[in-house]
Image (cartoon, helix red, strand yellow):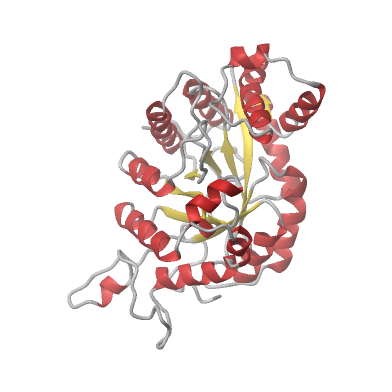
Amino acid sequence: MNEIQGDRTDGDGIRGTAAGTAPVPLSVLDLVTVGQGRTATQALRTGVEIARLTERRGFHRYWVAEHHSMPGVASSSPAVILAHIAAHTDRIRLGSGGVMLPNHAPLVIAEQFGTLEAMAPGRVDLGLGRAPGTDGATAAALRRSDRLNEGAEDFPQQLSELIRFLDDDFPDGHPYARIHAVPGPVQATAPGGVQSAHRPPVWLLGSSGFSARLAGTLGLPFAFAHHFSARNTIPALDLYRESFRPSAVLDAPYALIGVSALAADEEAEARRQVLTGALSMVRLRTGRPGLIPSPEEAAAYDFSPMEREFVDGWLANVIHGTADEVRTGLDDLAKRTGADELMITANAHGGEARLRSYELIADAYGLPSAA
């Protein structure tokens, strides 16, 4: 497996370059959130606006994550959303953060991301997770099976199969040797065929040690979900670096972390906005998922003592405040974790607050503003 992506140079499409005064490259994780009084159409339009804004301001990549059966998150189909974003952008890298591989047949994912690569050559990332991205009942409906643990346990095998489809290199005698993911490398071997040398780099995503170790062993880039698993961040990154073995993909570890951060013109407004995400998480964790509440509803909500404790803990991991305060928080986090890249997710009720946040963060770091 260490021979995967052998036609790539180290870091091709993986390693970013920090812009302005940012300590590391900055990227975006868009959950395509749907607030009360808003539609999925509006949320997806906001996604396009965020991608175009952050492309213009020098962010490195824009990712969306697979979620299911959550009214407030309209990102159940990452490949469809990324195709839409690709049509409205020119340079920013686009990817999944991530596709939950156990929910899908590897061939389907290879076909979808081969198609995306054909649409946006050299700009597509394939981030993979082993969690369902939803509750157990929904996962069973997706997979047409109630054997959910099997999906996670089979993740390394599924990953190997997916990579072989992407590279079109099943060995002779393998049951899938005559099956090809199209668009893909097989088109270059057909008479008169010409195929792009690019194919999406594979990333492993995680919130614990399993994927960290696997990514290190395979020499793949690693993305850690610091935004909802902060206590595991440094142990997982340490494990990834300790486990890392140079590969045809990377000669040294490369790890990004997802960071929940929101900047506003005033500190009180930032607090007002992030409280909507905190209330949304309270409802999700107590089996009541819904649309993202408005700032007014979140401010008026009567939190129980247990809910207040959860909210305080949740908000302690959300970097929020003025642009200068958020910049300081991001700088400190990059230094403390040694992350090679920060992927910022701004969770708020309305698109306007999220767009303003990315603009303020870009300004704080002196990122380019050219059209």
Q: Which residue corresponds to the image point at 72% horizontal and 34% vertical from the top-left?
A: 317
Instruction: List the single residue furthest toward the bottom.
Output: 173
Rendered location of residue 287, percent (x, y): 65, 34
Against 39, is 259 above or below?
below
In the image, is 123 to the left or to the right of 316? Answer: left
Quadrant in the rendering for residue 169? bottom left
Q: Quadrant of the C terminus?
A: top left
Rendered location of residue 55, percent (x, y): 42, 38
Residue 5 visible at all: no
Rendered location of residue 260, percent (x, y): 63, 35
Quadrant in the rendering for residue 217? bottom right
Q: Quadrant of the N terminus?
A: bottom right
Q: Which residue corresponds to the image point at 37% horizontal and 46% vertical from the top-left?
A: 80
In the image, is 163 to the left or to the right of 21? Answer: left
Residue 300 visible at all: yes
Q: Nearest the camera: 132 or 7?
A: 132
Q: Which residue corresponds to the image point at 46% horizontal and 18% vertical from the top-left?
A: 37
